[in-house]
Image (cartoon, rainbow, N blue to C red):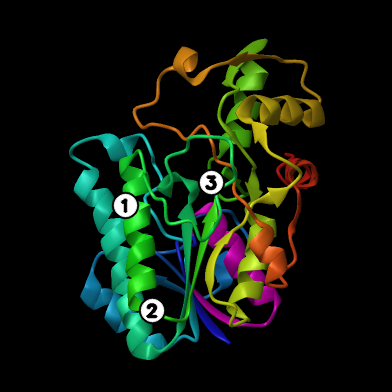
């Protein structure tokens, strides 16, 4: 199978390329950079195409030339707070909504599968009930959430052979993430303040990439939620476990989102994602986040 992957200079796209290659699929990666930028791994040796997904003509030319069997669309504007700046709003929409529509339109013409990575931010983040993947009660609170929802709708309204996979709290080797930030902060300070009223589950891109490739190898189309197993936690709980497994003695102080402040964009309090549909469809659930964290810490040891 030939698979085209966007956003390979990011955490998830990087791991998806490695997984596709490991399984023997012909994969081509893309990002906006002129050449691959990221962790020094086998991804740097795999085929790469520089592509601005907001350029509809360029998207059409690249995809028609490659004629893939599937596209895994990981590229996105993910700087949630910066997305709120007035000068960035249309840039964010051009990437997350219009860029996604550009890809979906060519996938339709080529009759190829498309897998779109989305987020719990498409919901209003309230309550305590886990969000069902087929829930249509959308009410995004941020520019990021609104534009990712627009991307979802572009895929669902354009294609029949699509997967929309919502994820949350992502961490991986290739790029910045919460774990790396906390490890750096924990080295510098004796005490850190972390919010304890935002609840969800972390997602290790290495584990997620295996699931995503399982999906595009299938025809079990539709909406899915995918995070690691292990239960719902707060960012405070996550930080405590990061420091415990890393052997840090840093004190973690729980605070509310209001007490913490700083954020321009509204953060969801309820990022609980119901993943039962994965099992019902016959997909293998991801390992626990505690196990994933341990493997990740070993991976990034210097």
Question: In the structure shown, which secondary structural element does the residue marked by tag 2 occupy?
Answer: loop
- Earlier sequence position, callout 1 versus callout 3: 1
**At which x and y percent is residue 263?**
39, 25
Instruction: Please state which of residues 184 and 226 is positioned toward the viewer in this rendering.
Output: 226
**At which x and y percent is residue 87?**
18, 39
Residue 196 higher or lower than 133, as above or below = above
Does residue 170 appear to the left or right of 293 in the view shown?
left
User: In this figure, which residue is indicated by the disc labeled 2?
Assistant: 159
Question: In the structure shown, which secondary structural element does the residue marked by tag 1 occupy?
Answer: helix
Label 2: how many residues lie within 10 Å, few (<14), some (14-19) or many (20+)? many
Does residue 294 appear to the left or right of 121 in the view shown?
right
Q: Quadrant of the C terminus?
A: top right
Q: Residue at x 67, y 33 (%)?
A: 233
Question: In the structure shown, which secondary structural element does the residue marked by tag 3 occupy?
Answer: loop
Principal secondary structure, stretch drawn in magenta: helix
Q: Check if residue 22 falls in the magenta segment.
A: yes
Instruction: Please state which of residues 5 and 99 is positioned toward the viewer in this rendering.
Output: 99
User: In this figure, which residue is indicated by the disc labeled 1?
Assistant: 147
The reply to whether residue 62 is in sight is yes
User: In this figure, which residue is indicated by the disc labeled 3?
Assistant: 175
Magenta-tinted stretch: 9-28
Q: Check if residue 43 falls in the magenta segment.
A: no
Residue 55 higher or lower than 288, as above or below = below
Q: Residue at x 54, y 36 (%)?
A: 270
């Amino acid at each position: 199978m030939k698979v085209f992957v966007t956003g390979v200079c990011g955490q998830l796209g990087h791991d998806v390329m490695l997984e596709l290659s490991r399984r023997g699929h012909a994969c081509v990666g893309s990002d906006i950079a002129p050449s691959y930028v990221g962790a020094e791994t086998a991804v740097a040796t795999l085929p790469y195409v520089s592509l601005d997904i907001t350029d509809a003509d360029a998207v059409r030319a690249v995809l028609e030339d490659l004629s893939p069997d599937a596209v895994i669309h990981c590229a996105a504007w993910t700087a949630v707070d910066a997305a709120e700046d007035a000068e960035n709003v249309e840039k964010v929409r051009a990437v997350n909504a219009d860029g996604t529509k550009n890809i979906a339109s060519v996938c339709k013409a080529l009759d190829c599968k498309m897998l779109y990575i989305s987020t719990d931010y498409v919901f209003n983040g309230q309550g305590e009930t886990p969000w069902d993947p087929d829930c249509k009660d959308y009410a995004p609170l941020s520019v990021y959430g609104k534009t990712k929802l627009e991307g979802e709708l572009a895929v669902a309204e354009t294609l029949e052979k699509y997967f929309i996979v919502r994820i949350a709290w992502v961490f991986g080797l290739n790029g910045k993430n919460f774990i790396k930030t906390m490890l750096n902060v924990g080295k510098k300070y004796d005490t850190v303040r972390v919010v304890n009223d935002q609840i969800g589950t972390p997602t290790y891109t290495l584990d997620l990439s295996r699931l995503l490739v399982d999906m595009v190898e299938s025809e079990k189309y539709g909406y899915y939620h995918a995070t690691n197993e292990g239960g719902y936690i707060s960012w405070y709980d996550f930080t405590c476990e990061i420091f415990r497994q890393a052997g840090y003695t840093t004190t973690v102080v729980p605070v509310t989102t209001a007490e913490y402040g700083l954020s321009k964009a509204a953060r969801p309090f309820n990022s609980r994602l119901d993943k039962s549909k994965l099992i019902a469809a016959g997909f293998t659930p991801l390992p626990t986040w505690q196990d994933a964290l341990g493997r990740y810490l070993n991976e990034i040891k210097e």
